[in-house]
Image (cartoon, coloured by chain):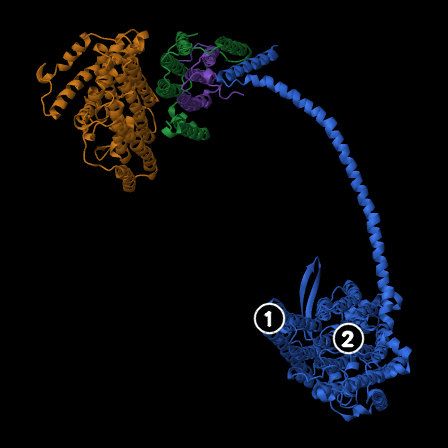
Amino acid sequence: MSEKADQIFVLLQHWLVSLLPAGWQQPGGVVLAVLVIICLFPALFALAVWMERKGLGRIQNRLGPNRVGPFGLLQPIADGIKSLTKEDIVPRSADAAVHFLAPVVLVVTVFMGFAVLPMGRNMVLADMDAGLLFYFAMGASTELAVFMAGWSSRNKYSLLGAMRAVAQMISYEVVLLLSSVAVVMMSGSLSLTRIVEAQNHYSWGLPHWYIFTPWGCAGFVMYAIAATAETNRSPFDLPEGESELVAGYHTEYSGFKFALFFLGEYLAMFSISGLGTTLFLGGWSAPFSWLGWVPSWIWFFAKLMLSIFVFIWMRGTLPRLRQDQLMNFAWKFVLPMCLLNLLVAGLWRFMGDGWPRWVVCSAILVLAYVGMGWGEMRRKHFGARSYRYAE
Amino acid sequence: MQETISFTPQLAASPITGILWLIPAVPIVASGVIALLKQPKRKTAAALAIGSLSFSLLLSLVAFAHVVAGWAHGVASRETVNFTWIQVGTANVDLGWVLDPLAAVMLVMVAFVGLLIFIYSVGYMAEDENFTRFFCFMSLFAGAMLGVVLANSLLLLFIFWELVGLTSYLLIGFWYQKPAAAAAAKKAFLTTKVGDVFFLLGMVWLFAQTGTLLFYNGGAGSMEAGALAGLLKQPAALGLTAAGAIGLLIFCGAAGKSGQFPLHVWLPDAMEGPTPVSALIHAATMVAAGVYLIARVYPLMQAGALAGGTTTALTVVTWVGAFTAVFAALIAVAQNDIKRILAYSTVSQLGYMMAGLGMGGVAVGMFHLITHGFFKALLFLGAGSVIHGCHEEQDIRRMGGLRADMPLTFLTYAIGMLALCGFPLLFSRFWSKDGILEAAQHWSVAKTPFYLLVFGALLTAFYMTRQVGYVFFGYWRGKKPAHESPAVITVPLAILAFFAMALGLIGTPAWPWFRAFLDGRAVGFDWHGFAEPGLAGLMATSTLVVFLGLWLGWRLYGGQAPTPEEPDVLEKAAPVAWGWLRDRLYVDELYGVTVIAFYWWWARVADWLDRRVWGGVVAGVAWAFRGWAQLNQFLDNNVVDGSFDKGCDELASGGGLLAAVQTGRVQTYLRILALSVVALAAILIWSSLP
Amino acid sequence: MMGHATPLTGFLLVAALLFSIGLAGALTRRNAILVLIGIELMLNAANLNLIAFWRYGPHPEALTGMMFAIFSIAVAAAEAAVGLGLVISIHRHAHTTDLDAMNRMRG
Amino acid sequence: MSVVFYLLAALTVAGGLAAVMLKNTVHCALALTVAFAGLALFFLDLDAQFAGFAQILVYIGAVAILVVFAILLTKGSETPKDGVYSRNWLAGLAIAAGVFAVLGWAVLQSARVLPGPGGTPTATPEVTVKEIGNALMGRYVLPLEIVALLLTAALIGAVIVAMHEKEGAK
């Protein structure tokens, strides 16, 4: 029974495809899967927006939206309708073509990213051999889209915001890649399904998720940092830092294009955390062996929502990082830690089973972390907090 | 006569022989140290020299005792220590030193006499400011002389031989400011060098024939039977066997150094050096080196001698020795310089030794050498004390009557004079002379040497009494009154005087200790020694001759020696002969005319050759090169420059065109690149068209 | 996707066209950066050739073509970085990116 | 000639032409990214999956942005006063045309001359990332190391060249 529940969607797809004539079956299956993704994730987007606004409210000791629908559940739909109907103003001096293209490129590339994520047991749109590489290739073009948005609106603030966003995204993209390379090294393949299978074993009931290994844990922490930076969220949301740069690179956008940007941002968040779960949290594998009967896709989406919650939680609590702090942090702390993590992963692989492997690897990582941290802190002398008020 | 002595050589070197090399080494090292000292460091220099020589003397005495002990046990030991000095391809040159009775005796004599002379010269050279330099050369000489005595290889002997020659040059020319001294040193060095050249020839020939220069090497040495047999087989020139020829060549070297007839000219002039030098070098040791060399090489000279007979080499030695003895004695009679008389006397005595060696074998010659060494050193030191006393006056005609002023010197000098004349019984030369005369009597070849030697003995007695008469008797003819020399001078004289008398006793026919010691035979004291046939007659004639000489000398010069201006008594008797003798029989002038003239002539020829012939050749070559250089220049200017420069100009102008292309703009370069690609591709395609 | 119909020459022609477009850009444009863009295009055309020959070559499993293309992409990236760095520094000194103006290296 | 090939060819050539012809430099840069994308698709079409993704990641991800940054940093975005093309642009164009003629001719020539399957492709090679990994680490390890070195050097070099000198050095 649980087997059927697990494969419910796959069976559904096969059933629908079988309805089509023979010639069209293969493309039809693909189109169907694409349709599912295109519908499912915007729905999740709506849910995430609601979660964020309620969550933030709760964190900031206020209620959050509760007027529209029970507990404000229908608020996102209201926002959606608002953004669709609002007038789409394009500045005269803006570069119309590029201005229009920016959000489109953004959303398209992000959606492309979802193709390779394994939502459940053999529930993946395109099981590519170099799936991870494809994902990062798509991820790389978001920066271009951000730049096009920023530049085309011919506005100093948006240009500055775009420049900051691109710089930030480039720096953290390197970290993103390196932390995931560790996983690739251990699992020995770039295809995400095989990575998930590699984590899908249990010993004494505990899963073999990579996060439970020293290098995996360090990798996941750095991946999380890079993820938040990549999607311009919470501590790293300087580009559209409301207070200084109005809305960053999408200040000149309004109406539907703004909604597209908003959607793009959330979809990026979904796909980054989806990848995070597949790489570190064991994708669709159950947390405990005795929970195996629960369908695989439930675990995937549960972990997904958990990560989204963490994003929201971080946004609510952590202060925003200054640009130079942000860059220094990336290049002088996170990147070296990633490189070290690669070394430790190599060491882990060749030390063979047994407790010494754990002790040595975690010792190296902790020592490096403490050492670099202490090195960084030593030079900074923290005086009393000083406030400067604009004259 | 002389028998071939067989030695039982002890192969294993006893400990004393092992450290024997220290004897020559210590004085040489001492001289090196003294050379480094500063001039005012007089006391250290003297102490070092005397200390090192006394150490050598001590060691020589120990060695002498060792040999005597060995001899007492009836075994005549000859211990050698040989080592390879240079390895030249397969042949290796060995050196080494030897300890046998001959060497032991010489060691003691040289060291003892040397030490006495060192002590004497501390007093004698006191005021001389080059005191340290003097002792440096003296100890170097002593070391070298001891080296000559010890050497077991002809090569090592030759090395020390040259060192001795060098030191004699340095010491003769000690007061180099005096031109006469410098000339005398040069003369001494060159004449001995002539002898040494022949010596070297002999040595090389020996090495070629026998392949080794070691005297004794456990049977393989050059002086041992194996090598000698080989040498005998080769006939050399003039009917001599190879052994004889080599022996003669070596004798020439000895003749040079010991001042035998043809090469004796340097010895009298060598008196320019300070008296201790003359005493040490030109009386006791260095001149004796020649005799010692012949003694050492005796087996070679004697090789092939039939039982009792002699070889031609030995006969030559004898004749030269005898003639020199008489010749020098004659000249000595007509000399007026106190030291020159003694010098000629030394030459004559050396002639005796050579004759002794030639006729009587090693023991006879060596005994006379040892005794002569002591009393001649005594006489020279005595003369030195006299000169010192008379404020550097050397002409005997300006002395006289020193009997009263210098009693001690007079006493020791008289003993020395009597020993030299061979006053019977008590004095040493009587016995050694008798040994030689006895050998001359029995000499198988001819009787004349015997008569010559007897006549020589007469002359010796005569000129010595003449000299004593002039110096010690009569009245003081000098300017300032003389004074007695200090103890440091007279004490050595006394010691030497004692030995001048005592040494004779070890060679008397009754108790021939010295000859037995050298031959390694047992010896007993018995009066029958005198009972030998003809010996009594011989001793009678020799005593007669001595008394005759003394009486003649005393009668002519005893009482009132003539004033310096008056001619000599004998001169009045035979002015022409006296003139000849005084001018040394014009030997120097003879050389001057022949040898030196030849060199002058040869030098001019060489100069002419060098200037004209070689000069011409060089000039021709230079001329050729200049011409070649001019040709080069011509070619260079016209042909090369012309064409090359023109070519360069063309290139430069061509370059100009290309320079235009370098506009500095990137795109022009890119265009040219693309154009060339197109052109190349076009050519490629055009060529590949079927 | 089964082996497809287009012959090798098609790809080669496209690559040649792209190459000459890049060359034209490099030769005619005045702005230094556009020359660099032209050069990038030429490099990419070469990559296309490499992959085409690898794909149509006798034994594609040797991966030589693809390896070559990957390395050439890496090198081209490095070249672009340094080239643009130079252009920026020239701009800072000479305040122009106009190639005709930059003829300081004249012969 | 399959439809996909024509489509891709059109896309790439158009991108290339635009990158070269457009007035506004930023537009040129964006056209360039289109050309890069076209090429990436070509690679995928030629079953070189890894190369295609690498092309996207490197060129579109990095080089395009680099070019854009360079343009912004050198104020290239304003249209230049004295014309976009260098003085004797016609000569450049002619030379480019010449090169294309030669290349085209050579390609066509080789098609005729080359025997064998010059035209038809072989079976699609099954290229997995593991094989590429082995190749990189096995046969091509030296070039890999050298490229690594080269990239580091280029990285440092570019930074130093483009670094903003201190005021004094101006």
Residue type at numbered disc 2: Val
Q: Colour of chain B?
A: blue
Q: Residue at x 30, y 18 (%)?
A: A142
Alpha carbon of mark 1 to alpha carbon of mark 2: how far? 38 Å
Percent from the top left, x then y, of residue B60? 65, 78
Residue C29 can be seen, yes or no: yes
Is A191 left, or right, of B644 in this rendering? Answer: left
Left or right: D88 in relation to B279: left
- Tell me which chain the residue with mark 2 is part of: B
The residue identified by callout 1 is B40
Give left or right: position of B466 versus B173: right
Between marks 1 and 2 in the image, the one whose residue lies nearer the viewer = 1
Give the number of callouts: 2
Answer whether residue B523 is visible to the viewer in this image: no
> What color was chain C assigned in the picture?
purple
Q: Which chain, by letter, is green?
A: D
